[in-house]
Amino acid sequence: MKYDRINKTLFETNRRNFMAAMKPNSLAIFNSNDIYPVSADSTLPFAQHRDIFYLSGVDQEESVLVVFPDCPKEKHREILFLKETNDHIAVWEGEKLTKEAAFETSGITTVYWLQDLEKILFELMTQADTVYINTNEHYRANVETETREARFVKWLKDKYPAHEVAKSNPILQRLRSVKNPIELALMQQACDITEKGFRRILNFVKPDVWEYNIEAEFMHEFLNNRSKGFAYTPIVASGNNANVLHYIENNQQCKAGDLILLDVGAEYANYSSDMTRTIPVSGRFSERQKTVYKAVNRVKEEATKMLVPGAYWEAYHVEVGKLMTSELLGLGLLDKADVQNENPDWPAYKKYFMHGTSHHIGLDTHDYGLLHEPIQENMVFTVEPGIYLPDEGFGVRLEDDVVVQASGEPFNLMRNIPIDADEIEDLMNS
């Protein structure tokens, strides 16, 4: 890992909160992700399952966490099972967690090697009535590959068919959506790294640069600041490419007079940032581009103020739609007849702003959070309105990551990243 060690009190707190929500006499099991093969002996870079990381801080493959708060043996109330390390593994694969290092990382004192899992789990299951299994129930999830977790659940249900089964996901959806101060500090660090990347490219962009050149500049800055890289596949979309919402080819040349939509964010310690800025290739916005840009920014600023405790995600989006409708009327893109005759299920503004405004962000870019429950203090959301004009050859989207506060406006984790149109022009021409 490139990041500094995280204070283990974060993971100790997370486990206490999770266990407090469990049924009596129950245990919960969490697996690391697989290392996924590509072909021959090639693999994809390892990315840890966010749930086991959230509860333990363990960031390596072939790891299992078991929590059993009512276990008769006190030492078995929290257990880590790790791949056994040795000198040979250290030479060929790099250093893995020792039992001592696992404690320093997680705060868990009982650590066994993975080869002992089945034997110890048999003892634990004879003492438990319910077992919590970990499933992916995120509203955007579309899982086609069988995960290590899914294989384990199949084995567990076959081996112990008489146990009651419960789901850990609803507990984690609530817990992970509200951020601990340590998590907020890690997310701030991810946003600060993103800021460094953005300021770097403001001095780099010029006519005829290629989109992938810009992507490379971001990656250079991210890696130099202890990030693994992008929190998600970056979008560097010049000209009409900005009107393709998930444009990721990043293989076109940036032409004088065009805008570039940059949807990029650094990760840090597995925590995500998610920024969008739209900048002029030539260093100056046209009058029309700046007018549209300022309209999007006004929507973003007003939408941000609506993210308050007790608000509901769905109702919030309805209100943001009203803000955008007003701006589109002012730009002459809609008229009153368009609004009066709109389909309530697809309002008129959706012609130019067809995606949502906000999503939870944290360990995942589209993080856990139950959208039918009210917004709470210390939830972190993106705010990302846009206006897309394929007939005019450009699109504008602006996005910050904000922390909901107990009172007042949310705290902007990206407050130091330039967003004002005039400031961006000044920086690009300085």
Image: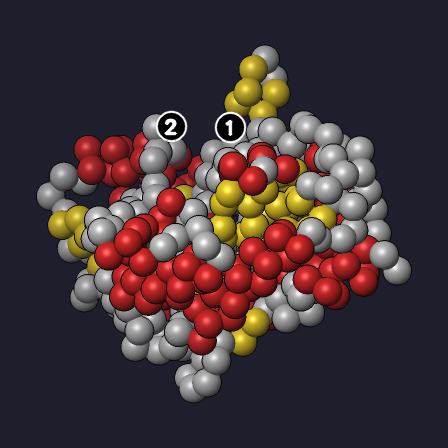
Q: In the figure, is residue 258 to the left or right of 371? A: right
Against 29, is 430 above or below? below
Q: Earlier in the sequence, mark 2 or mark 1?
A: 1
| Residue 270: percent from left, percent from top | 57, 52
In the rendered structure, the answer to whether residue 237 lies left or right of residue 331 reads right
Residue lying furthest top: 40
**Residue 231 appears at what percent x and percent y?**
58, 47
Q: Residue at x 78, y 51 (%)?
A: 283
Q: Which residue of the protein is positioned furthest toward the left in this rendering?
A: 162
Identify the residue shown where x is 34% and y is 28%.
144
Identity of the residue furthest to the right in this view: 430
Q: Amino acid at mark 1?
A: Tyr
Q: Which of 194/267 is in front?
A: 194
Q: Which mark is residue 145?
A: 2
Say if 204 sits above or below 307 in the image: above
Image location of residue 380, percent across then percent down: 46, 66
Could you say which is closer to the camera, residue 106 or residue 308? 308
The circle drawn on residue 36 is 1
How many C-alpha atoms fall within 10 Å of the one at disc 1: few (<14), some, or many (≥20)? some
Q: Residues within 10 Å of mark 2 (few under 14, many from 20)?
A: few
Q: Amino acid at mark 2?
A: Thr
- Residue 236, given in percent of the width and then of the height, sits at 64, 40
- Specify whether residue 223 is in view: no
Quarter residue 199 falls in: bottom right
